């Protein structure tokens, strides 16, 4: 009798067992560390961010809502660098939330604007971003 009660013919059973013990965890780890771009499905829509909207994002949103942001809570709730990895339903939800938060005046946060007065959105910038977000959400729902 060989290892684990298997009869071993020249170690063939043992070699297969060891192969499985190594191959299965390697496959699991391989899938776990794939980038979101590899894992995304067919339901990942494209969105276009015009330069004027991107400028507003860069000034008032990206300091808290990007891969480089230090605020984990804000970054985890909305990360503009990850918008392209969201499926259609999640993206529509984020776009509607962007529009709602800006219309309600809850974004950018008041304590952030106190520290960074340049991040305050003008009425035109608010309209620009909310019109863009609403139009993108409508387009995605209509597709």
Image: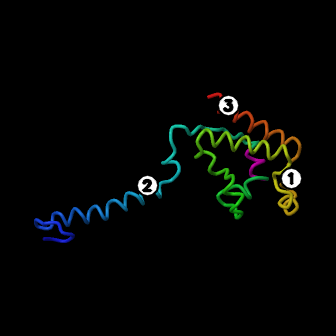
Q: Residues within 10 Å of mark 3 (few under 14, many from 20)?
A: few
Q: Residues within 10 Å of mark 1 (few under 14, many from 20)?
A: some
Q: Residue furthest front?
A: 5
- Residue 98: quadrant of the picture: top right
Mark 1 lies on a secondary structure that is: loop
Q: CA distance from mark 1 to mark 2?
A: 42 Å
Q: CA distance from mark 1 to mark 3?
A: 28 Å
- Relative to 69, 32 lies left or right: left
Mark 3 lies on a secondary structure that is: helix
Q: Is residue 58 magenta?
A: yes
Where residue 68 sits: x, y (%)? 66, 61
Nearer-the-camera pick, 84 or 20 = 20
Which disc, if any, is residue 120?
A: 1
Task: Point out the image quarter for the N terminus.
Answer: bottom left
Q: Residue at x 83, y 51 (%)?
A: 106
Q: Is residue 19 above or below residue 142?
A: below
Q: Residue at x 30, y 64 (%)?
A: 21
Q: Is residue 84 above or below residue 139?
A: below
- Relative to 6, 52 lies left or right: right
Nearer-the-camera pick, 29 or 50 = 29
Q: Earlier in the sequence, mark 2 or mark 3?
A: 2
Residue bounds of the magenta highlight: 54-59
Where residue 75 sits: x, y (%)? 68, 57
The answer to whether mark 1 and mark 2 are in CB contact below 8 A is no
Which disc, if any, is residue 31?
A: 2
Q: Is residue 47 magenta?
A: no
Q: Residue furthest top?
A: 142
Where residue 78 sits: x, y (%)? 69, 52
Which disc, if any, is residue 139?
A: 3
């Amino acid at each position: 009798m060989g290892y684990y009660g298997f009869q071993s013919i020249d170690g063939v059973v043992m070699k297969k067992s060891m192969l499985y013990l190594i191959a299965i965890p390697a496959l699991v780890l391989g899938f776990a560390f794939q980038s979101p771009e590899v894992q995304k499905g067919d339901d990942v829509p494209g969105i276009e961010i015009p330069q004027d909207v991107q400028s507003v994002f860069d000034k008032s949103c990206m300091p808290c809502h990007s891969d480089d942001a230090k605020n984990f809570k804000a970054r985890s709730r909305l990360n503009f660098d990850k918008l392209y990895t969201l499926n259609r339903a999640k993206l529509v939800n984020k776009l509607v939330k962007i529009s709602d938060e800006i219309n309600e005046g809850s974004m950018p946060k008041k304590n952030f604007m106190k520290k960074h007065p340049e991040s305050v959105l003008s009425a035109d910038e608010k309209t620009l971003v909310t019109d863009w977000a609403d139009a993108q959400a409508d387009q995605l729902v209509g597709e």
